Image: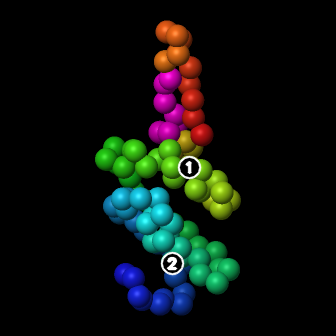
Amino acid sequence: GRGVDLLVVRQVIVFDMPNTVKEYIHVIGRASRMGDQGNAILFVNEDSRNLFSDLVPALKSCGAAIPKELINLTSREVHNNNKKRKVGY
């Protein structure tokens, strides 16, 4: 939780996606303090889908690996002049 200073955390598992990407980054930041590397595992469901399009660029900006499943979930069909095309991150 907040205010707890754990010195050696290598892995964070998030069972419920926070309400914002900023909150998510705060939570997973506990796995990589002071230049150390760590891992974060996030369980998501359809209720969190609205955050996926913000999550992918945030992960890219810090050089994190992005699972292909997450990229696929952010792809969406765009209808433009009765033509379909795939748009994704």
Can see residue 8?
yes
39 is within the stretch colored magenta: no
- Amino acid type at circle 1 is Val
Looking at the image, which is closer to me, 41 or 30?
30
x, y (%) of residue 13? Answer: 43, 68
- Amino acid type at circle 2 is Arg
Residue 18, which numbered label? Answer: none
Looking at the image, which is closer to me, 42 or 58?
58
80 to 61, vertically: above or below: above
Bounds of the magenta span? 72-78
Looking at the image, which is closer to me, 42 or 57?
57
Quadrant containing the C terminus in the rendered view: top right
Residue at 48% over, 89% down: 6
x, y (%) of residue 33? Answer: 59, 81
Residue at 59% over, 77% down: 32
74 is within the stretch colored magenta: yes
Residue at image mark 2: 30
Looking at the image, which is closer to me, 37 or 78?
78
Q: In the rendered image, which quarter is residue 24 located in?
A: bottom left
Residue at 45% over, 71% down: 27
Density class for disc 1 (Cα within 10 Å; few <14, some 14-19, many ≥20) is many
> Quick one: SS at disc 1?
helix
Residue at image mark 1: 56
